[in-house]
Image: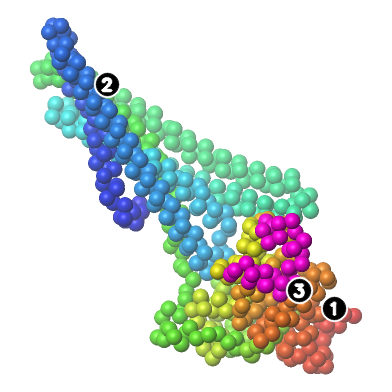
Amino acid sequence: MQRLFHEARTYYLRLVVSFVLGAIAGLAPLALAPAVEFLKKFLDHDPAQHLQVLWLVIAALFLSNALGNLAGYASSYLSAWVGQRFIADLRVRLLQHALRLSVAEYDVWRPGDFLARFTSDLVLMTDAMSISLPQLIQISITLVGALVYLVITDWRLTLALLFVAPVVSFTVNQFTQIIAIKSRVTQNRIAEILSNLSDVLGAHRIVKAFHREEYETQRFQQTNEHYFAAYLKMTQMMLTQIPVVNMINVIAFMMVVGISAHEVIVGHMDRDSVFRYWTLVALAINPINRIAGYVGDLSRSVVGVARIYEILDLPLEEDAAIVMPSVEAAEQPIVGDIVFDHVRFSYPKTSVPILHDFSAHIQAGSVVAFVGPSGAGKTTIASLIPRFYDITAGEIWLDGRPLRERSLASLRNAIGIVPQDPQLFHGTIADNIRYGRLDATTREIEAAAQEANAAEFIAELPQGYETIVGERGTRLSGGQRQRIAIARAILRDPRIFILDEATSALDTHSERLIEEALETLLAGRTTIVIAHRLSTIRRADQIFYLDQGRLCEAGTHDDLLAAGGLYAALFAAQFS
């Protein structure tokens, strides 16, 4: 919470104004104590002689209440504005930070864990900062003002009353700790629900294809029941806290009544002071009861704050070019000459090596292919070039300079990737193509679609380029999605092209259209092709055969067939 308030320093002026208004709203109810004392005296004397004074007191009470309500409204609104503004900025920071995490760091988390931070955890903060915190300020002022007034009225009786304060404080503190623990468990259960939903809804067609609707429903019901049980335990603690604190306060009030009666008998207090004192005690007890509830809300919000900072404290993707002595040298245009120099790689938090002493030279402007069985390390190599992961040992050179000396921005701007499963966003076809270069004109988008052999099928759609592709492009066929992805890459005009199984899941017709689109696109660009289907790589300038993270063979298609090694065996198996 200290960190939270430190980061909210931009809004301190508004918070101070809100606090002052909250103090006014909190002090307004204290006017009731002298009013009750006056009414007691008024009724003890001839009321008819003091009617004008009575109306003045009633008017003063009305104005005091109206002023308190207006100040309370203004204080709550200002606090809500600050809270919502801060949380809105925090939400953007959270997304920005998540997007700047390294792929290795991001892969550790489930999507539902991130979604829970954006939804339920921020909701906890919203409720606490917009509702609970301003109300807590107001009633705390009322409580402090009532206690000061009580001391002035009778310090002996107040001193006896304050012996109850440690009991109340201890009780609230114990409940706060329990509520925080239960709230943390509840938030984790919410993350599990969101992860489950993300998995199931994202694989909707697979669920239906395997007729697993009932299975997934039961699995989700189990996760939902875990959340239900956790939430009830947290709610039980929150609901128990209020009556327990209330009972302590009732006992304290009964003590006050008994002790004050004794004070009147021994002559330490008069009857008018007793009435004023009882009124002040009633004014103090109400804030104490409400404080317990608001403290519970704030303790839950602390859990949300901690879970949000858990994401914000994750290390960002390192960009070694920031510390380069010569920025100009680091940002020279990329040509595309790539050298793997005795590279070794293991995925983070694992000790299993994926690449073993891998060395290869990819000349600028050439087309090379990586082939081999599943798990050989082909896709890993494709992930190392844009630095989705950093190598464990060795070096990757780009245009004669270590890859890590290139800024991530310049490196990735020079790379175009077409994966096996192209990721399209829910939006129009034009928007998805424009994602390759955000400032592209309509004519450039259409030209890129033409080069990708996508213009023909787009023209046949009712809305053309304004057709909504659906979540992840589900309204398009696999070949259509792939051609949109290629158009997006064409628009980017990269120096290095990475095709990761780009045609392996397509039919022959779609594959032929895409290969025709690539003929023009790949000319003069450094191209890395990852493929299982060897028909797509026959024209590669060089083919690298990998197995278990090691380079076993390298050469042209004809040379490798003539050698009669692993590549020749794989080719024979596919075309026998």
- Asked if residue 411 lies in the magenta stretch, the reply is no
Quarter of the image for residue 41 reads: top left
Residue 417 shows in the view: no
Figure check: 410 above or below 137: below
The boundaries of the magenta stretch are 440-468
- In the rendered view, tell whether residue 255 sits above or below residue 365: above
In this view, 554 is above or below 350: below
Q: Residue furthest front?
A: 443
Q: Left or right: where does residue 315 sit relative to residue 58?
A: right
- Amino acid type, callout 1: Gln
Ranked by sequence position, the earlier of labels 3 and 1 is 3
Residue 1 screen position, x and y as percent = 35, 51
Secondary element type, mark 1: helix
In the current view of this chain or complex, which residue is farthest to the right? 576
Q: Give the residue displayed 68% in from the left and 52% down from the top.
A: 200
Q: Is the residue marked by circle 2 packed among few (<14), some (14-19), or many (20+) residues within 10 Å?
A: few
Q: Which residue is drawn at 58% across and 87% down?
A: 335
**Helix or strand or loop: what does disc 2 sit on?**
helix
Q: Residue 514 carries which label?
A: 3
Q: Residue at x 41, y 41 (%)?
A: 297
* Disc number placed over residue 254 in the picture, else none: 2
Callouts 3 and 2 close, C-beta under 8 Å: no
State the residue position of label 1: 574
